[in-house]
Every structure is written in C-alpha cells, then in structure tokens.
Amino acid sequence: FTTGYRIDVAKWDADKQRVKNGCTNKLKQSASEINADLLKYYAEIQNVFKEFEVQETMPTTQQLKDAFNLRMKDNSEEQQEEAQISFWEVFDEFVKECGNQNNWTASTYEKFAAVRNHLKEFKEDVTFEYFNEFGLNEYVNFLRDKKDMRNSTIGKQMGFLKWFLRWSFKKGHHQNIAYDTFKPKLKTTSKKVIFLTWDELNRLKDYQIPKDKQYLDVFLFCCFTSLRYSDVRNLKRSDVKPDHIEVTTVKTADSLNIELNKYSKAILEKYKEVHFENHMALPVISNQKMNDYLKELGELAEINEPVRETYYKGNERIDEVTPKYALLSTHAGRRTFICNALALGIPAQVV
C-alpha cells in the first residue's frame, strides 16, 4: 500500500514502523500527523482480519487489499461529505459575519458571491486541508487558464481567499496555515489612471448632448465636485445649498462640505425645476448603463487619445493600445477632478 507520505530514512524508526517523534517531512507534515494515519490504517487492517475470522477463513492478499480499499473509500466519502458541507457553510457564515461587522456594500457582497462561484467551479468538494501550497497553486492556475484572468485580478482573488482562510483559521474551523506563507510570483504593473485633461473636459462639456442623454451632466458634475458615483446617486435636493453641497459619503461615511464652482452650479441650476424620484438632485441612472453611455459619448466627442495599457497573464506580457473613450467610467470623473486640481497647483492635502 502507498500511504501518500514520504519521509527521510533517518527520520524513520524501523523497529516501531513509525516516524520518529518530533520529525517532519519536506511538506511540513509532522510525525504525529503521519503516525496517526498509520495507526488508522493498522486498525482498519485488523478489522478486515476480524471479519474473515468470523467466517473462519484467512484472506488472500488480494481479498485483504480489496476489503481495505473499500473501507478507506467509504471513510473518505463520508469525510468528504462532512467537509463539503462545512467548507461552504463556513464560507456563508464568514460572508454574513464580516458583512455585518464591516457594513459591506452591495458590491462587496457581489464580489464574494463571485469568489464563492469561482471556488465551486474549481472544486465543488474542496476542503480547508486541500489548500496547502499545491492546492493554492492549482487554484492560481485555474484562475489564469480556465477563467482567463490577468495577474492583477488573480492577486485580488487570492487576497479574498486568504481573508476567508485566515478568518476560518482564527475561528478554529481548520489548522491549515499554508495560506500564510503562500506568495505566488505574479508579475503585475501599476494600473493606468484614466482621467480627462482640461481640454478634453471642456470638449465634453461643450458637446451638444442629445435630449435623451442628459446623464452626461451627472458625469461632468463628478468631474467638477470629485463625487463618487455612489455619492452623486445619493445626492438629494436638500443637500444642495447656495454655494456648497453637504454629503455623507456612502463608502467611508465622511461628512463633507464641497464648494460649488460655476460649472457645478450651472448643472444643478439646469435641473432645479425637474422632479426626480427619491428627491434626487440629478438624473442618475445605473452605474453599468452610465459606463456604457459614457464610452459612446466619449467617442462622439472625439476623446480618442490612444492609451497604452500593459498587463500580464502568467509570464506573458500583453500591451494593448485603446482609445481613451473606451476606458471611460464614472470613476474617471473623480480622478479628473483630482488630476486637474493638482495640475492647477492646488496642494495635495487641500485636494
């Protein structure tokens, strides 16, 4: 029989047929762990002999082997079933507890739902014990080869998995701390910061927006106030004062008074007589739709400076040149405010 363990001869006690106390192998499996399994196998073999004794026969080598393998298979399936339930139950418990403690937003819950789906697709009967160095490497390979992820995205996914494994270790659900020292070599480059220059911002501002595409004003408002999409969506008429807006940010719960300039005032003025649901101050649509439309409007306004992005998949370096409009998103509004404010010489701490 093969036990699946390897040990240096010097660490093996041939008389006792056990690993010498205090020794470990190259995979950091300890003598107590290996010996416990050897003892378990020994007990199972004794049970096979007992069954044959009842029939008053002696098993052949093959009968012994078959009976032993059958017992180990049954045990392993039972354990797997228990482990399978516990791993996914613990994951759900983690999401529930951390979500409540840290006031997760809907998007963070969505991220962890995606993490759960990736893990399930990778190995439905996964256990905590599986994620040793080999298992963690296999998961990295799966994300790269099967899910076609960039190295930077794989890094984020591994960060989420490590968070869960660390939390479940602290809760006593497992003893496997391989995640702690696991650092895959993932070549990455810093992400390009996409923002509009002052000229591009003016080009977009002066573009004649079709009547059915007024949401461009919402993006421009973000460019002139630094608001995140979540905060402009949350902006109510009552938050708008004559020369400033009062905002409690959704992401960080900061209470801010943001001065209005002539551009942001003009946008609010344009909609002051228009009624929006939930007393919103501006015609905000869903983030996904807004991102799609922004790319379309950016193309119409000829925001087409080529932008080169470099990223890695495994060891392969990929360079992509894309027109800037194709990379526009609502968050580019906040970056546009910051970059232009710094370019105007406003000190970083003021910004």
Image (cartoon, helix red, strand yellow):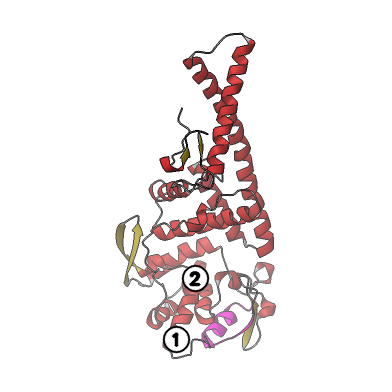
Q: CA–CA distance between discs 1 and 2?
A: 17 Å
From this viewpoint, which residue is outermost toward the top?
A: 56
Q: Quadrant of residue 254?
A: bottom right
Look at the image and say whether residue 173 sits in the magenta stretch: no
172 or 247: which is nearer to us? 172
Residue identified by numbered label 1: 342
The local crowd at label 2, few if under 14, some if 14 to 19, many if 20 or more residues have their Cα within 10 Å, is many
Residue identified by numbered label 2: 331
Q: Left of 15 or right of it: where is 278?
A: right
Q: Amino acid at mark 2?
A: His
Q: Secondary structure at mark 1?
A: helix
Work out whether 155 lies above or below 86: below
Q: Position of residue 122 (x, y in %)?
A: 48, 43
Q: Position of residue 197 (x, y in %)?
A: 39, 80
Give the residues drawn in magenta, as a range: 254-273
- Whether residue 76 is visible to the viewer of this picture, yes or no, is no
Q: Residue at x 53, y 39 (%)?
A: 34
Q: Left of 197 or right of it: where is 176?
A: right
Q: Secondary structure at mark 2?
A: helix
Q: Left of 106 or right of it: where is 13?
A: left
